[in-house]
Image (cartoon, rainbow, N blue to C red):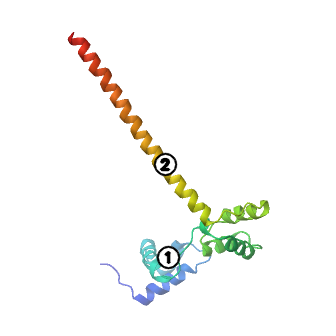
Amino acid sequence: MATRYSPEFKDQAIEKTLQRGDKTIQSIADELNINLFTLKEWLRKSKPTMNPTSDPQRPADWTTKQRFEALMKSAGLEGEPLNAFCREQGIFSHHLDAWKQGFITGSSSSGPTTDKSLRTELNQVKKELNRKEKALAETAALLVLQKKCQAFWEEKA
């Protein structure tokens, strides 16, 4: 028989998991004496309801100002505190390294607009390539059929 948990217990478990620091989800599940997959399912279901107004941005869509602020906030962090900061922001430490290099070299001007225009151009090139590949395959098939037809008529003669 499945164990029923109260909504309050579920909320507390989710809150404890989200504020776990350097603990694993498995260790939290063991502390609460619940199944790991049950806890993960609660987390998955709770994510859409937690911050419905906040729209998470991909690191590539961050503005230059947001990147600079993230670099300033993470300036003195190393190891686990840096990883915790990155988790909170939804980024990885290699994003911070790349942004830092971009500011140093002065090539951090690539914003969301240029990324979007590059993406649309890439999609157009992919469509064109796909169309040309199909036309080439059709032409090759017609040539093979033409050769087979000629060979068939030469056998009859």
Q: Position of residue 134 (x, y in %)?
A: 39, 40
Q: Where is residue 10 in the image (x, y as percent from the top left)?
A: 44, 84
State the residue in front, 141 or 100: 141
Distance, label 2 to label 1, CA atoms, is 49 Å
Question: Is residue 97 positioned above or below 127 on the image?
Answer: below
Locate residue 50 relative to residue 104 in the image: left or right.
left
Question: Which quadrant holds the C terminus?
Answer: top left
Question: Which quadrant holds the N terminus?
Answer: bottom left
Q: Which amino acid does label 1 sit on?
A: Asp
**Residue that carries the numbered disc 1 in the rendered image:** 30
Which residue is at a point 54% across and 54% down the rendered structure image? Answer: 121
State the residue in front, 9 or 112: 112
Closer to viewer: mark 2 or mark 1: 2
Instruction: Characterize the local packing of mark 1: few (<14), some (14-19) or many (20 or more) Cα atoms within 10 angstroms.
Output: few
Residue 132, quarter of picture = top left
Question: Is residue 112 positioned above or below 6 on the image?
Answer: above
**Residue that carries the numbered disc 2 in the rendered image:** 126
Secondary element type, mark 1:
helix
Label 2 vs 1, first from the N-terminus: 1
Which residue is at a point 30% across and 26% down the rendered structure image? Answer: 145
Which residue is at a point 70% across and 61% down the rendered structure image? Answer: 98
State the residue in front, 67 or 21: 67
Q: Where is residue 23 in the image (x, y as percent from the top left)?
A: 59, 74
Residue 153, quarter of picture = top left
Residue 152, quarter of picture = top left
Q: Which amino acid does label 2 sit on?
A: Lys
Determine whether label 2 and label 1 are within 8 Å by CB: no
Say how many tags the image has: 2
